[in-house]
Image: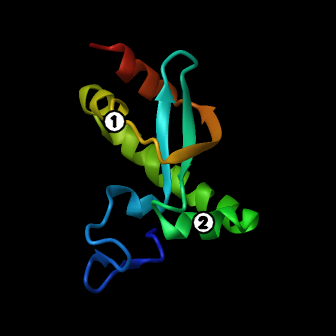
Amino acid sequence: MFCIFYDKVTKKCRVHEVKPETCCAGPVTFDINLRTMKIEWFLKKSGLCIYAGGLFGNPQSLEEHLKVAKVDLIRLIRELDGDDLRVILKREEPETFKIGEDDLPNEVIEKLCRK
């Protein structure tokens, strides 16, 4: 699944000069709350991603998109090793707001607890 502004022919974003890595999940991103062991879902603000504004204004589209984005992002989280995942979690994304949370898969909890 790709953002609607991702051009599959040119493999570039039609809006931004550089295609952000989260274009594969659209404007949805995540964080892991190590205190609660929950995966928290965030939507980028419309100033950062035009598509996010369209999704936010259409709750049904946001729900459908989030469902698919969660699958893609959880697959990514499961594939990363613990060290790589911890590096990603250090990255701040201030231009987002929380739209939900889910339980973290057990294998990811185990991976994050290993050092």
Which residue appears at 58% of the width and 44% of the height?
97
* Frontmost residue, 37 versus 91: 91
Which residue appears at 60% of the width and 56% of the height?
66
Mark before the other along the chain sequence, 1 or 2? 2
Which residue is label 2 attached to? Answer: 53
Check contact, mark 1 vs mark 2: CB within 8 A. Answer: no
Q: Percent from the top left, x then y, of residue 56?
A: 66, 62
99 relative to 52, above or below? above
Which residue is label 1 attached to? Answer: 91
Which residue appears at 53% of the width and 15% of the height?
35
Marks 1 and 2 sit apart, C-alpha to C-alpha, by: 23 Å
**Residue 43 falls left or right of residue 7:** right
Q: Percent from the top left, x then y, of residue 102?
A: 62, 35
**Residue 23 falls left or right of residue 28:** left
- For the image, the number of numbered tags is 2
Residue 64 falls in image quadrant: bottom right
Which residue appears at 36% of the width and 80% of the height?
14
Crowding at mark 2 (Cα within 10 Å: few <14, some 14-19, many 20+):
some
